[in-house]
Image (cartoon, rainbow, N blue to C red):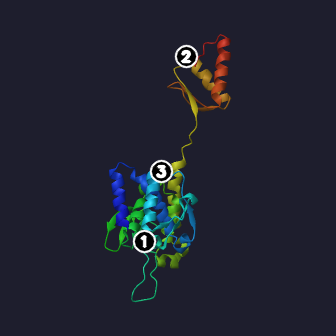
Amino acid sequence: MWTYVIEYLKLEMGNGQDIVEVIQPLIQIVLLANRGLKAEKECYKIDDNWSVPQQELLNHLRELGVIFIRKRKDGVFFLTQLLTHLSTNEMIDDTSAEKVSNGKVIVETNFRVYAYTSSLLQLAIIALFTEMTYRFQDMSVGMITRESVRGALQHGITAAQIISFLRANAHPQCIATSGPINCLPITVADQIRLWEDERHRMDLRDAYIYSHFESEDEFFGVRDFAQQQKILLWADNHQKLVIVNEEGHEQVRQWYKKEKSKGGSSSA
């Protein structure tokens, strides 16, 4: 089934579609499926903002039987047992009634990741936020780095989703030793969140810039007025630049007219 999905994505890429955009809902659905039986009992809203290619992918998943949509107008879908089985690679040993645990991932405090699985889907998900370094038949090794996590964040994956996936797929021995939360080292979880916070450092605002002043007195007059009115965002004395917030632009205009009416030499 996943071979079909991969070939479909290759076809979309050949048609010039943005593969990252197309695959985004697939990643979200697979991450939901990793919650197991609980995920199957819940309904999920079809995002109205999904593009036409994303909606088409959803229809293909419906035809494959990995999701269930009762009526399109309902705007919701359900995960099927087939998807849960394929995404978690859960299986029953023929020689034993004991269920094999889904957990196959070990994360160390040095950010090294050991994935004991041959599931191409699970490895593909792990590779979204991990730099894979070694690949063996039933085990892969990688490193969680700032660059790998930022790459995942740029594709629409959140820090919470990464942390949730690693905890949901943690090795049973890690859970037995440290518990369901600390099976993923706290230092690693906190660092992933910090890397996400780095993307929100910039504060975007509408502003007005003043340049090409006729004299230094004109520049300093505008700068000092903006500073006094607390509308100054930034000023450069060397390049003679003044930036004020959007609300302050009208105040600067009124001040400018007043100064001109006095016969001053300032003009912005």
Badge 2, how many Cα within 10 Å: few under 14, some, many 20+? some
Q: x, y (%) of residue 127?
A: 39, 62
Q: Label 2 is placed on what type of residue?
A: Ser
| Between discs 3 and 2, the one toward the N terminus | 3
Labelled pair 3, 1 in contact (Cβ < 8 Å): no
Tell me the SS state at disc 2.
loop
Question: Whole-Å distance between the Cαs marked 3 and 2?
Answer: 53 Å
Question: Whole-Å distance between the Cαs marked 3 and 1?
Answer: 26 Å
| Along the viewing direction, whichever of 1 and 120 lies nearer the viewer | 1
Q: Is residue 254 left or right of residue 215?
A: right
The residue pinned by badge 2 equals 215
The quadrant where residue 113 appears: bottom left
In this rendering, the label closer to the viewer, 3 or 1: 3
Tell me the SS state at disc 1.
helix
Tell me the SS state at disc 3.
loop
| Along the viewing direction, whichever of 72 and 164 lies nearer the viewer | 72
Which label number is shown at residue 123? none
Q: Label 1 is placed on what type of residue?
A: Leu
Badge 1, how many Cα within 10 Å: few under 14, some, many 20+? some
| Along the viewing direction, whichever of 91 and 124 lies nearer the viewer | 91
Badge 3, how many Cα within 10 Å: few under 14, some, many 20+? few
The residue pinned by badge 1 equals 86
Residue located at (44% from left, 63% from top): 61
Residue located at (47% from left, 65% from top): 30
Q: Does residue 41 appear in the picture of this structure?
A: yes
Q: x, y (%) of residue 238?
A: 50, 26
Q: Label 3 is placed on what type of residue?
A: Ser
Which label number is shown at residue 51? 3
Residue located at (56% from left, 58% from top): 73
Q: x, y (%) of residue 11?
A: 33, 55
Q: x, y (%) of residue 196?
A: 51, 54
